[in-house]
Image: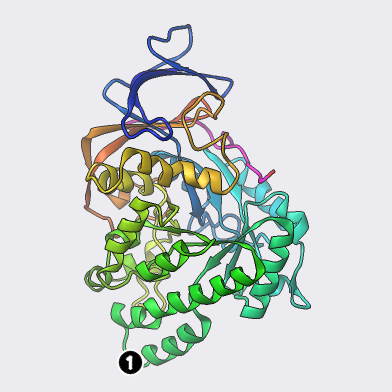
């Protein structure tokens, strides 16, 4: 395959360069001008060519919760938005990925469904601790990209860990050189506040008050203190407050945020209702501006979607307390950052590449195979027409989830083609062009 005449976003460059790209055997083998040959030609004149997007935080719910999403629909939606690699969370499948046997069961269920490349995180929950220490850590650590933990959880099969257990996890992770990921909301605060505000009301403000800025800050401060004592490698997922991101930037930990926190505030939650219910909830005005500032300047390492859809019935239970907390996001992650970040001047081209692909690839050991357009990397590319605008219509999502807080929003920059290892998997106006199973399972090793 040769991609001709595109404006190519090379690593570290602030402006795209007019180049052709040759892909052979799934790898980029040459970049230059006026490349020719007998290969398939993809015309990219007028298009921006980016490295394939990496979404390092998705819940594809497979196996066990496939009424909400599965690896087929989830990966197709991701591809439609220019994502070529995802890393799936361990907590929203049955069984959860807390042992190698459970991982193998999950892999067998999904490997014939994925149209893009994918990997897994392992998980550590209260059920997978023995005498205060995590079980199966060494065996799983050779395969997964990190270990997900929660300070508070409502999942029966994946319960939270307390601070003592979390410290033990960090100590063991430091010994093995693996990353620990944390959903950072404080158990004591959220538990008491939820009981109190459930008795006072049933609206977005009540739900927000049960998990406000303070709940995230308390958890982040505790986690960072334990990281400093243990020397462990911590990544804070889906940060929603500017102060929490500031704390992370002053530490050795890395962090991510999501489009929902960059775009929406509590005011929007009040207006929109449960289509915008996520956990943690969107916060008061001022936080999103600080998150944008830090994402652009480097204080936040990258963006992720926290993709977690559900059918309409789960979003429309009649109570904010029982409505499902999650939205479909992997297919809108990269388009949102192109439109509201790069094309609106919030992100430079260099930073766009970093926060949508390069930094996650480096963080989880996928680089140099993923995360950049250069000789030797996988031929994962997304072709974007920066001059086209399009409207978000949830009913058109290739996900099983169709309720989105971005409904009706107009984005600039349309994904025209998504290429995974030299094979076009999605084309605008046509759809998915490969069968399930094209996606390759990736491991930490």
Could you tell me which residue is drawn at 73 percent across and 50 percent down? 142
42 lies above or below 91: above
> Residue 184 appears at what percent x and percent y?
50, 71
Is 300 magenta? The answer is: no
Between 50 and 231, the residue placed more toward the observer is: 231
Q: Is residue 66 visible?
A: yes
Q: Which residue, given by chain and number where applicable, does mark 1 sit on?
A: 200
164 lies above or below 59: below
Magenta span of residues: 429-444
Q: Is residue 18 left or right of residue 254?
A: left
Q: Is residue 403 visible?
A: no
> Residue 373 appears at what percent x and percent y?
46, 29
> Residue 413 appears at what percent x and percent y?
26, 38
Could you tell me which residue is drawn at 47 percent across and 79 percent down? 218
Q: Is residue 245 left or right of residue 27?
A: left
Q: Is residue 54 left or right of residue 230?
A: left
Is the C terminus in the top left, top right, bottom left or bottom right quadrant? top right
Question: Main SS of the magenta segment?
Answer: loop
Could you tell me which residue is drawn at 52 percent across and 51 percent down? 70
> Residue 3 appears at what percent x and percent y?
40, 19
274 lies above or below 195: above
Q: Residues within 10 Å of mark 1 (few under 14, many from 20)?
A: few
Please identify the quarter of the rendering in which residue 315 is found: bottom left
Q: Residue furthest top?
A: 37
Q: Secondary structure at mark 1?
A: loop
Please identify the quarter of the rendering in which residue 11 is found: top left
Q: Is residue 436 left or right of residue 259?
A: right
Is 434 magenta? The answer is: yes
Between 255 and 68, the residue placed more toward the observer is: 255
151 lies above or below 395: below
Q: How many marks?
A: 1
């Amino acid at each position: 395959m040769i991609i001709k005449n595109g404006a190519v976003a090379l690593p570290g460059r602030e402006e795209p360069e007019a180049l052709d790209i040759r892909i052979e055997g799934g790898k980029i083998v040459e970049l230059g001008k006026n490349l020719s040959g007998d290969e398939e030609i993809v015309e990219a004149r007028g298009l921006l060519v980016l490295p394939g997007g990496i979404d390092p935080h998705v819940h594809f719910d497979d196996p066990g919760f496939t009424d909400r999403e599965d690896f087929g629909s989830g990966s197709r939606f991701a591809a439609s938005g220019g994502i070529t690699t995802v890393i799936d969370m361990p907590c929203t499948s049955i069984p959860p990925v807390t042992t190698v046997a459970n991982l193998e069961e999950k892999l067998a269920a999904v490997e014939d469904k994925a149209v893009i490349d994918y990997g897994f995180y392992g998980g550590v929950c209260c059920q997978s601790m023995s005498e205060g220490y995590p079980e199966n850590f060494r065996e799983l650590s050779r395969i997964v990209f990190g270990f997900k933990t929660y300070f508070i959880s409502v999942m029966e099969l994946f319960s939270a860990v307390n601070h003592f257990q979390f410290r033990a996890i960090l100590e063991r992770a430091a010994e093995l050189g693996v990353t620990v990921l944390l959903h950072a909301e404080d158990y004591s605060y959220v538990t008491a506040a939820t009981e109190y505000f459930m008795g006072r009301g049933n609206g977005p403000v009540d739900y927000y008050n049960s998990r406000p800025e303070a709940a995230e800050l308390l958890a982040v401060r505790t986690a960072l203190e334990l990281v400093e004592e243990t020397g462990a490698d911590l990544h804070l997922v889906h940060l929603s407050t500017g102060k929490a991101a500031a704390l992370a930037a002053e530490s050795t930990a890395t962090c991510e945020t999501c489009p929902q926190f960059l775009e929406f505030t509590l005011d929007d939650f009040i207006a929109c209702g449960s289509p915008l219910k996520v956990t943690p909830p969107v916060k008061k005005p001022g936080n999103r501006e600080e998150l944008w500032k830090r994402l652009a300047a480097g204080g936040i390492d990258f963006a992720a979607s926290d993709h977690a859809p559900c059918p309409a019935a789960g979003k429309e239970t009649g109570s904010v307390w029982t409505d499902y907390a999650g939205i479909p996001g992997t297919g809108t992650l990269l388009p949102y950052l192109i439109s509201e970040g790069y094309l609106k001047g919030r992100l430079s081209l260099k930073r766009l590449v970093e926060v949508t692909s390069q930094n996650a690839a480096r963080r989880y050991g996928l680089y140099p195979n993923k995360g950049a357009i250069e000789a030797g990397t996988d031929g994962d590319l997304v072709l974007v027409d920066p001059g086209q605008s399009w409207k978000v219509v949830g009913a058109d999502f290739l996900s099983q989830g169709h309720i989105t807080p971005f409904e009706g929003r107009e984005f600039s920059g349309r994904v025209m083609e998504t290429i995974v290892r030299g094979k076009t998997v999605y084309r605008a106006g046509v759809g998915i062009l490969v069968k399930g199973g094209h996606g390759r399972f990736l491991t930490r090793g």
